[in-house]
């Protein structure tokens, strides 16, 4: 039997105290991260420096003893590896030279992608060698829809006007971008698994912005294909899907994509998830990152509520979205001790 708690839960086991890791657990809320980040130069320089990427991945493991380490990287290394210009502007976020029609796709190429991303896979294999044996190594990618939003909008977006405009007006043309990403993302995940990732997570952060039929076409279908392509090479790899904002589509996503487990966003009622999802597959989530920022009684009550609803089935403790950069590290420490049952509240 594995001594990795996360793998056991993803295989269907219920633990008296669930495993815990947090989305964006490596990042700016940690002073030791800010120090390495300042030395690295740009954010992408940090992503492509295996030594520093390994160091910042390990920082939260050393500090808090999480049950899993998530590779330090970004979902935008895939478009970058495909040949799109990607850069990060301090305090603004990612910028990309947008692609808005089929002609724009000509600038992208799948053939050189994994070769360009070798430093990422090097970090994975160095991490696999460095981690304590009870800690699971998680690799990840953005899902096709979410990666496409950044590629088409040219960065973060409020209304997704460009991508919806293209997808609704020219579904076949937009479909060729989705097909390219489906293949690229499967290859990127396989390369991480090959290098030593033991679980992979698919981040679909913008799954919640699509109407009915479009959700099936641009979220469920491409995700199902990515999962199938990865499983062709690695039939037993656990895959966690995070369709943030999927709401009433969570059960359909869970049943039809083939993912091993689903990560619940902050808004999913845990009592409902216990009855409608956890009987089908393990679930992960979903403390509001704002409650972790707040700490104190509000956080304690939020954690207790989640543990009561989801703790009696296969469950991985996490946030409902990434950690906020102003979060005091002491609150994270408190959270871990609570979930571990080291302190009674
Ligand atoms: O979880 C981890 O600790 C692993 C590392 C990780 C990062 N990004 C590091 C990062 C992971 C898993 C991601 C995923 C990611 N990246 C997503 C999906 C999850 C989500 O948050 O919805 C998305 C949408 C991105 C794209 C992205 N990267 C944006 C929009 C931004 C800017 C927003 C921000 O918080 O500044 C980033 C930058 C980024 N990715 C940072 C980190 C630690 C902060 C940049 C910095 O250190 O300067």
Image (cartoon, rainbow, N blue to C red):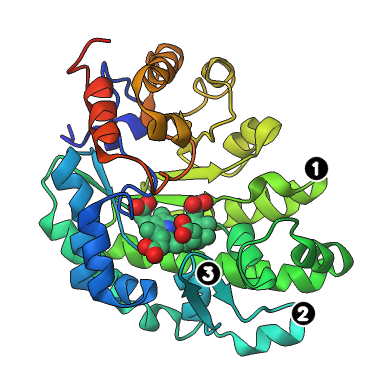
Q: Are the residues tagged 2 and 1 within 8 Å (C-beta)?
A: no
- Residue 104 shown left or right of residue 300 in the figure: right
Residue 147 in view of the camera: yes
Kind of element beneath mark 3: strand
Q: Nearer the viewer, residue 207 or 257?
A: 207
Give the labeled residue for mark 3: 94
> In the figure, 116 relative to 149: above or below?
below
Q: Quadrant of residue 46?
A: bottom left
**Residue 260: percent from the left, percent from the top?**
45, 39
Which element type, helix, strand or loop, lies under badge 2? loop
Quick check: which quadrant has ligand 1? Answer: bottom left
The structure residue drawn at horizontal position 44% and vertical position 45%, both measured from the top left corner, is 322
The mark found on residue 51 in the picture is none
Do the CB atoms of the residues marked 3 and 2 lie less than 8 Å apart?
no
User: What residue is drawn where x is 75% and y is 56%?
Assistant: 159
- Tell me which label, 1 or 3, sits earlier in the chain: 3
Residue 137: x %, y % from top left: 26, 50
Q: Across the whole image, how many numbered discs are drawn on residues? A: 3
Image depth: mark 3 or mark 2 in front:
3
User: How far is mark 3 from mark 2, CA to CA?
Assistant: 20 Å
- Residue at the spot of label 1: 212
**Given this view, does label 1 or label 3 mark the residue nearer the observer?**
3
Identified at 37% across, 49% down, the residue is 24
Front residue of 280 and 82 = 82
- Left or right? Give the position of 221 relative to 318: right
Residue of label 2? 101
Mark 1 near mark 3, Cβ–Cβ under 8 Å?
no
Residue 3: x percent and y percent?
A: 15, 34
């Amino acid at each position: 039997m594995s001594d990795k708690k996360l793998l056991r839960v993803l295989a269907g086991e219920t633990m008296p105290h669930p495993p815990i890791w947090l989305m964006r657990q490596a990042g700016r809320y940690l002073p030791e991260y800010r120090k390495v980040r300042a030395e690295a130069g740009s954010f992408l320089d940090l992503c492509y420096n295996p030594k520093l990427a390994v160091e910042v991945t390990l920082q939260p493991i050393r500090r808090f003893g999480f049950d899993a380490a998530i590779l330090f990287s970004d979902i935008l290394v895939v478009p970058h590896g495909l040949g799109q210009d990607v850069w990060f502007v301090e305090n603004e976020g990612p910028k990309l030279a947008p692609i808005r029609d089929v002609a724009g796709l000509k600038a992208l190429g799948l053939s050189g992608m994994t070769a360009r991303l070798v430093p990422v896979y090097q970090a994975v294999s160095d991490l696999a060698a460095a981690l304590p044996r009870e800690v699971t190594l998680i690799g990840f990618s953005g899902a096709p829809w979410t990666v496409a939003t950044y590629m088409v909008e040219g960065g973060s977006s409020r209304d997704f006007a460009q991508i919806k405009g293209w997808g609704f007006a020219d579904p076949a043309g937009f479909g060729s971008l989705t097909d390219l990403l489906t293949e690229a993302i499967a290859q990127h995940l396989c390369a991480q698994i090959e290098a030593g990732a033991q679980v992979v997570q698919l981040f679909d952060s913008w799954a919640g912005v699509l109407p009915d039929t479009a959700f099936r076409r641009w979220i469920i279908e491409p995700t199902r294909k990515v999962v199938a392509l990865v499983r062709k090479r690695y039939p037993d790899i656990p895959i966690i899907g995070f369709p943030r904002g999927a709401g009433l589509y969570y059960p359909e996503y869970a049943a039809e994509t083939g993912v091993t487990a689903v990560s619940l966003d902050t808004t999913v009622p845990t009592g409902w998830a216990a009855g409608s999802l956890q009987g089908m597959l393990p679930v992960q989530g979903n403390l509001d990152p704002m409650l972790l920022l707040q700490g104190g009684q509000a956080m304690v009550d939020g954690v207790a509520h989640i543990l009561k609803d989801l703790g009696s089935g296969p469950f991985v403790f996490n946030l409902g979205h990434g950690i906020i950069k102003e979060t005091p590290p002491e609150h994270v420490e408190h959270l871990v001790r609570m979930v571990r049952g080291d302190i009674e509240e």
